[in-house]
Image: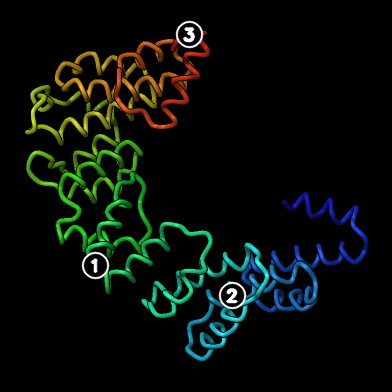
Amino acid sequence: MRFFFYFCLLIAPPALADQTADFLAARDAFRAGDAVKLERFAQRLKNTPLEVYASYYRLHLGLENADARPVLSSVEEAVKDFLSRPEDTPMIDRLRGEWLKQLGKKQQWDGFDAEYPRLLNEDTELTCYALQSRLRSQEQTALHEARRLWFSGKGQPDSCGPLFEAALSAGIIGEDDVWQRLRLTLEAGNVSLAKQLAGRLTGNHAVPPAVLESAAADADRYLGKLAPEKLTPDKKHDGQRAVALFALHRLAKQSPDLAAARWEKMAAYFPDAEQHYFYGWLAYEAARKLDSRAQQWFKAAENTPLNEQQSAWRVRAALRAQDWAE
């Protein structure tokens, strides 16, 4: 983007070149948190098409720095004026989203509810704030909608935390749901979140956080010390097999050869569905390393669901082998 603006400076008429230079200086001042310098260049951009960007920078910086109540009040008024502009530009909606996050963080729900319907581009953080607001009047509906956001291997924004806690307390998110999310976090390699979730599991699904830590630190060593009787295909050992599959997948990322060797010795201890599941990941990691065995492992995965990345690499492996039927 910087190259584009400098190119514009070379070919633009003098007035436009000056505006572009002022815009770049305003943007740099914003990134540096220099409100005084930003204000100077914002004044120079008044009555130009780039003024909306300078105003956005000033207000964004004002929101970040407004702690004292009188200062915050003046920023609020300026934000409201900016959001009420008749023109439709992405910068206005971007500031609207940032303003809504401020209101949600402070639980100023009346102001949040008034502005939220005008938002065009929503993210998960704002969705959770909107559901927090709905908790006041539609608790069950809001918690059931929050449950849909639960199933992610990635960490969710802090705004989702109160919703998840309420849904867990109400039983709307149950232990099976915690277990399913743990599997997703292990797939994503999100060990920190997996340890938090493991602390909520008991009985057959119990996974000691220390075991997760050990498997993450050295997958091959962990698998080498793992006793086969801890992997028997029954409910009693669900947690142990989940960690073993995590370690196997982690090892496959390093070396499909090592993972395949470990897997050969322990595959029989896993039920068919989990065997197919691991073959899907082993094939994926092999395909990424252009290993010719990827195709046979994808076929061994049979009908296990593959995600978008796995499916794409399955196609690539077939193309490399010119296996058109596959």
Q: Which mark is residue 323?
A: 3
Q: Amino acid at mark 3?
A: Asp
**Disc 1 target residue:** 139
240 left or right of 186 in image: left
The quadrant in which residue 222 appears is top left
Instruction: Please say if 101 is above or below 192.
Output: below
Q: Residue at x 44, y 12 (%)?
A: 326
In primary-sequence order, the first of circles 2 and 1 is 2
95 left or right of 43 in image: left
Front residue of this view, candidates 248 and 318: 318
Q: Amino acid at mark 2?
A: Leu
- CA–CA distance between discs 1 and 3? 53 Å
Q: Which mark is residue 28?
A: none
State the image coordinates of residue 1 (x, y, percent, origin top left).
72, 51
**Disc 2 target residue:** 83
Q: Residue at x 17, y 44 (%)?
A: 176
Q: Residues within 10 Å of mark 2 (few under 14, many from 20)?
A: many
State the image coordinates of residue 254 (x, y, percent, origin top left).
39, 25
State the image coordinates of residue 323 (x, y, percent, origin top left).
48, 8
Q: Residues within 10 Å of mark 3 (few under 14, many from 20)?
A: few
